[in-house]
Image: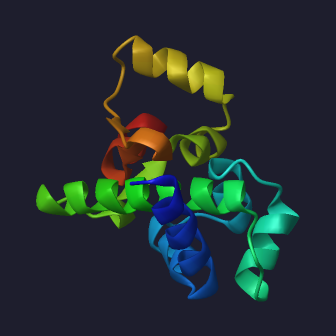
Amino acid sequence: MTDDEAVALGREVVQDGRLKSLRESLGLSPNAMAELLYTAWPTYRAWESRPVNLRKETAARVGRFYQHATSQLQDLDHYGINIRDMVPFHIVATLLGIPQEQLFNRYREGRFEATDLGLLGLWMLKTDLDELRR
């Protein structure tokens, strides 16, 4: 994807609501999506609530993010995995009441499985989360 294509895609997905739809399909809060996009949450909320004209650099970042995220979702779908059956690591840490660093250490020690979704981060199946809670 060229820079110009990324800029155009970024602006399009914000204007037509596809970025919000992606966030919702990932089951993320606006704040969590803002973190993934390296932007302040009030800025991200503005993108979802009113027409905005993204700066070129921001639009390119959003466009590339959108392209990669949707590609990851297509890969999951290809293998019969629904993102709704998964939970991102930051939520897992919150649900378990432990710091993310501790969760990462447990993962590195091989105490449970997770799926690396590239720029979306590490996710785990909800069924595996249920096992961790026991």
Q: Which residue is drawn at 57% across and 85% down?
A: 17
Query: According to the image, what is the colour scheme of the structure?
Result: rainbow
Quick check: 128 left or right of 98? left
- Looking at this view, name the residue that lies furthest to the right: 42
Quadrant in which the N terminus appears: bottom left
Looking at the image, residue 71 lies above or below residue 52: above
The spot of residue 128 in percent (x, y) is 34, 42
Q: Toward the viewer: 50 or 101?
A: 50
The spot of residue 104 in percent (x, y) is 52, 22
Can residue 134 be spotted in the picture?
A: no
The spot of residue 48 in percent (x, y) is 71, 81
Q: Which residue is drawn at 52% across and 61% down?
A: 4
Q: Which residue is drawn at 77% across and 81% down?
A: 52
The spot of residue 82 in percent (x, y) is 27, 64
Looking at the image, residue 81 lies above or below residue 90: below
Looking at the image, residue 109 lies above or below residue 61: above
Report the number of discs. Answer: 0
- Looking at this view, name the residue that lies furthest to the top: 109
Can residue 125 be spotted in the picture?
A: yes
Q: Residue at x 76, y 67 (%)?
A: 44
Q: Toward the viewer: 11 or 124?
A: 11
Quick check: 89 left or right of 114? right
Quadrant in which the C terminus appears: top left
Q: Toward the viewer: 4 or 50?
A: 4
**Residue 71 lies in quadrant:** bottom left
